[in-house]
Amino acid sequence: MNLAGRSVRALKGGVAILIVTMVAVALALLVNAAVPAENREMVSLIVGALITNLTTIVANLFPNNPARAARRTDT
């Protein structure tokens, strides 16, 4: 693996950690703070976008590989 490949992998890992941290902070703030009625929709959109990014990260880290699943022997 070359240096560019490592840099891209490190960047992806850093972005993943940043998104996970942002989701955790947003959910912690939602639990501990009251959201005014006029901002409730905006907060819901932001949290939804963060959760969508988190779902994409998890899907990319654990891809569904049918060839690997077919080779599994454990049931």
Image (cartoon, rainbow, N blue to C red):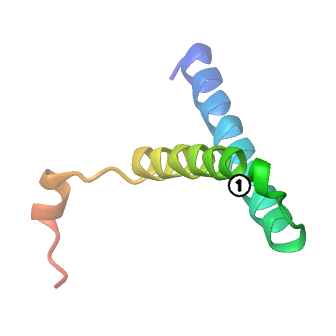
The C terminus is located in which quarter?
Answer: bottom left
Q: Residue at x 81, y 73 (%)?
A: 31
| Residue 46: quarter of image | top right
Q: Residue at x 26, y 53 (%)?
A: 64
Q: Does residue 23 appear left or right of residue 56 in this picture?
A: right
Pointer 1 residue: 23
Q: Which residue is drawn at 40% across and 50% down?
A: 59
- x, y (%) of residue 34? 87, 67
Viewer-side residue, 25 vs 63: 25
- x, y (%) of residue 4? 59, 14
Q: Does residue 6 appear left or right of residue 18 in this picture?
A: left
- x, y (%) of residue 5? 54, 21
Q: Which residue is drawn at 46% across and 44% down?
A: 56
Image height of 73 relative to 54, above or below: below
Farthest-out residue, right: 33
Number of disc labels: 1
Give the structural element (helix, strand or loop) at label 1: helix
- Amino acid type, residue under disc 1 in the picture: Val
Viewer-side residue, 11 vs 42: 42
